[in-house]
Amino acid sequence: MTMYAAYASNLDPTHMKERAPHSPVVGTGWINGWRLTFGGEDVGWDGALATIVEAPGAHVYVLLYDLDRYDLERLDVWEGADTGLYTRIRVRVSTLDGDILAWTYVLNAYEGGLPSPWYLEKIADAAEKAGAPADYVADLRSRPTA
């Protein structure tokens, strides 16, 4: 059975290669009905942490990975799912080839707080490199920071 991982805040395959070395990029897509936001400022290392939350009419651009079972365990540790920081959930991702189910992570903290400037810039730069539409990247770059 093929497993996929969808990442909205880490759209840089180089960074993901360190975390999930056996899981290649297979495309891009959108998680409809969700939006990228920040929360957990009190548990973050330098400002609020990225997450997605349900939001009718919104959508989040994601990079899709063909997820190896070994890498799924590694990602759980990397994302803090083993400590309760994030929870791994399944979401429906719309791609040019149709909808697929993919794993993603959501923060177990209240929404709110501001990301650090370098963190938001990293997210926006990676989105741009991953081919996100210009208006999506511009929206990311226009968000307030701590």
Image: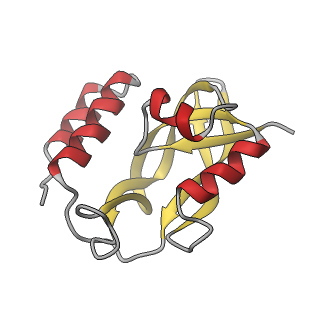
Q: Camera-side residue: 138 or 74? A: 74
> On screen, 38 above or below 133?
below
* In the image, residue 136 above or below residue 52: above
Does residue 13 sit above or below 20 in this rendering? above
Residue 104: image location, x then y, percent: 58, 52
The quarter holding residue 137 reads top left
Q: On the image, which quarter does residue 1 sit in?
A: top right
Left-right relation of 18 to 133: right
Residue name at image x 17 percent, y 40 percent? 141
The residue that appears at 75% across and 38% down in the rendered structure is 68
Residue sitting at x 38%, y 51%: 58
Q: Residue 71: where, in percent of width, then height?
A: 69, 43
In which quadrant is the C terminus drawn? bottom left
- Which color scheme did the rendering employ for the protein? secondary structure
- Counting from the top left corner in percent of width and height, residue 111 is at 33, 72
Q: In this view, does 76 lie to the left or right of 9?
A: right
Residue at the right extreme? 1
Left or right of 5, for residue 137? left
From the viewer's perspective, is residue 135 above or below residue 50? above
Disc tally is: 0
- Give percent across and percent down for residue 135: 24, 32
Q: Which residue is drawn at 23% across and 63% down?
A: 47
1 to the left or right of 10: right
